[in-house]
Image: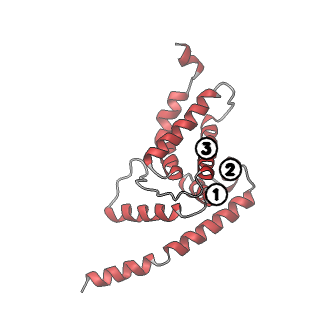
Amino acid sequence: MRWKNSYEGLDALVAERGSALLGTAVLLAGSRAAGEDLLQAALERLVRHWSRVRGDKEGYLRRTLYHLAVDQWRSRRRRPEVLAEVEPPGQPDGTDAVHLRHALVQALATLPPRQRAVLVLRYWEQLSEAEAADVLGCSVGTVKSTASRGLARLRELTADWATEDVQAWNGAGK
């Protein structure tokens, strides 16, 4: 009974937002297993500091999640990462969409950690520039320029996709 009173709202937070938090963690960490570990570590920190966290508990959890991910990226800077099996929770789609999503996630994996974090915050989490800057602890200008460079790099990486699709379509019709 003591646990229930001291951690009021934790079970509701995890029940309501757990899938979205796990999806974000998987994108940041690179695989489902690593994402689960990352989310678990962030939840552990939240529980340890539960009584001291005032206001938005989910915001604290998300900031912790991003900071832990950046710490992991720094510690394994030289080891290549492969992102796989990223599915938004509960959204069925066709095979083409799954292949496209997988290819986009692989392209995202080639970006530097800060660019990847900014793009995940802005376009996966749909945070504003100010909210992303707050989570990452940087200025709004840094978020804007980092997002711009990240999107430009993704465009470079995916530029030939349209021509490959057209060639595959033309080849299939022969």
Classify mark 1: residues with Cα within 10 Å, few (<14), some (14-19) or many (20+): some
Image mark count: 3
Q: Residue at x 53, y 18 (%)?
A: 4
The amino acid sitting under disc 2 is: Leu
Task: Find residue 53 and report its image quarter.
Answer: top right
Classify mark 3: residues with Cα within 10 Å, few (<14), some (14-19) or many (20+): some
- On screen, 96 above or below 42? below
**Contact between labelled residues 3 and 1, with CB atoms less than 8 Å apart:** no
Looking at the image, tell me whether mark 1 or mark 3 is earlier in sequence order: 3
Residue that extends furthest to the left in the rendered view of this protein: 174
Q: Which residue is mark 1?
A: 114
Residue that extends furthest to the top in the rendered view of this protein: 1
Q: Which residue is mark 2?
A: 136
Looking at the image, tell me whether mark 3 or mark 2 is earlier in sequence order: 3
Q: Residue at x 50, y 39 (%)?
A: 17
SS category of the residue bearing label 2? helix
139 sits left or right of 117 in the view? right
**Contact between labelled residues 2 and 1, with CB atoms less than 8 Å apart:** yes
CA–CA distance in space, label 1 to label 2: 9 Å
Residue 65, given in percent of the width and then of the height, sits at: 59, 43
Residue that extends furthest to the front in the rendered view of this protein: 78
Task: Find residue 62 and report its image quarter.
Answer: top right
Residue 71, given in percent of the width and then of the height, sits at: 63, 47
Q: Which mark is residue 155?
A: none
